[in-house]
Amino acid sequence: MGVKVAVVGGGSTYTPELVDGLASRAGRLPVDELVLLDPAAERLRIVAGLAGRMLARRDWAGRLVATGDRAAALDGADFVVVQLRVGGQAARFLDESIPARFGCVGQETTGPGGFAKALRTVPVVLEIAEEAGRRSAPGAWIVDFTNPVGIVTQALLDAGHRALGLCNVAIGFQRRFAARFGVAPERVQLEHVGLNHLSWERAVRVDGVDRLAELLEGEGAALAEEVGLPLELLRTLGALPSYYLRYYYASREVVAEQRAAPTRAEEVMAIERELLALYADPALDVKPPLLEQRGGAFYSEAAAQLIASLHDGAGDVQVVDVRNGDALPDLPAAAVVEVPARIDRDGAHPLPLAPLAPEMRGLVQVAKAYEDLAVAAAISGDRRVALRALLANPLVPGYAAASDLLGALLDANRAHLPRFFA
């Protein structure tokens, strides 16, 4: 029997990545209906046009539907992929520019900018999930790629939804190391620990043998440059931090850089204009190279691989955002963490891991406390809870900054925060 996949935010410029990944796994994942849902009709028309040409090029036998009708998109869906952006890139610009006025890192998934995005996003995703629960197929999965992934996934699971979160950081490292050692990606397994956008690789096992020390010794300079941190820091940690740790380990440098350059939102807006112009070309039937500059490398691989394994129960190991259980002894069982897990039809089963080193544990526990408060603030619209969340955020320097930031972020996002302005 075929599978129905509904993509919420199907007009995203990321969508061709997902379409490519699903089509390349037709043997494992027989999708007979792929629905792209988006309220932006013209954008959806352009993206769906390219998606249709890509699928035709592969002789895909399924049905592609582009719609703005949420009920129709969710009806009978086996998988609901959520990749929306509440407020679009204009809201992202605010997330990145407002914190800089208060001497803070401006980023769309971490710090005060990530908090603003969580406030906008969590209620919308929960509303979609509730409708999916009524309309989708029995046992349907929600796969969340919407940032901040850890916070959104925590909200989904706390509300009782069958959901997993997904990020491309781990698969990006896996593919890089597989190429370095000249092996197939499935022969590389990462000991990826922490939270979404707050994670480290503690081991890089190739055929079961940890090669991380060798990588740090032989390619440390290149890896340090890739994640934007000093080589000596990587060697001190004995681990490879994700690029997002730069916002924590080098906050002052990041703030100075951001004050002197355009925001990433402005760059992405320009890239998206070019991408949509390319997508509109009726002769284009493959992903354009420019899509790599949009970010989200290997997104199609991560998302399609996860959906395929949930469908066929492959039992392979993937890095996902999932309930901790007893994987990391440093955090509560109910906390959503980003760790390796075995994927089958019943979901993701985290692999047991050694405790975090103290320098990792302290940061993760503080950030997790912030995430819990961010979920509570987004759902309640309570300003005091929101202020407590910012006070707990490791990238907000104290009460005065938190109080001023909260007022500025709420005012700027008023149109998307009805719970705070009832």
Image (spheres, rainbow, N blue to C red):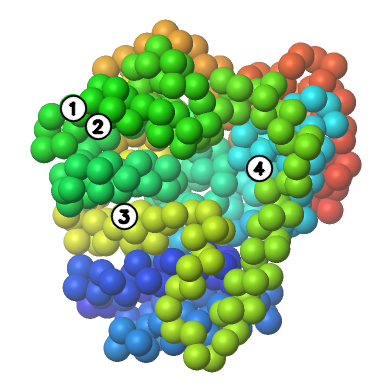
Spatial separation of the CA atoms under disc 1 and disc 2: 5 Å
Residue type highlighted by circle 1: Asp
| Mark toward the viewer: 3 or 4 | 4
Query: Which residue position holds label 3?
Result: 306
* Labelled pair 3, 2 in contact (Cβ < 8 Å): no
Spatial separation of the CA atoms under disc 2 and disc 4: 28 Å
Quadrant location of the N terminus in the rendered image: bottom left
Locate residue 179, reporting x and y percent.
25, 48
Spatial separation of the CA atoms under disc 3 and disc 1: 24 Å
| Mark toward the viewer: 3 or 2 | 2
Taking the spot 12% from the left edge, 33% from the top edge, the residue there is 208
Query: Which residue position holds label 2?
Result: 204
Query: Which residue position holds label 4?
Result: 108
* Labelled pair 1, 2 in contact (Cβ < 8 Å): yes
Say if residue 337 shows up in the picture: no
**Is 198 positioned to the left or the right of 372 in the image?**
left
Quarter occupied by residue 403? top right
Taking the spot 44% from the left edge, 46% from the top edge, the residue there is 167
Residue type highlighted by circle 3: Leu
Q: Is 209 above or below relative to 29?
A: above
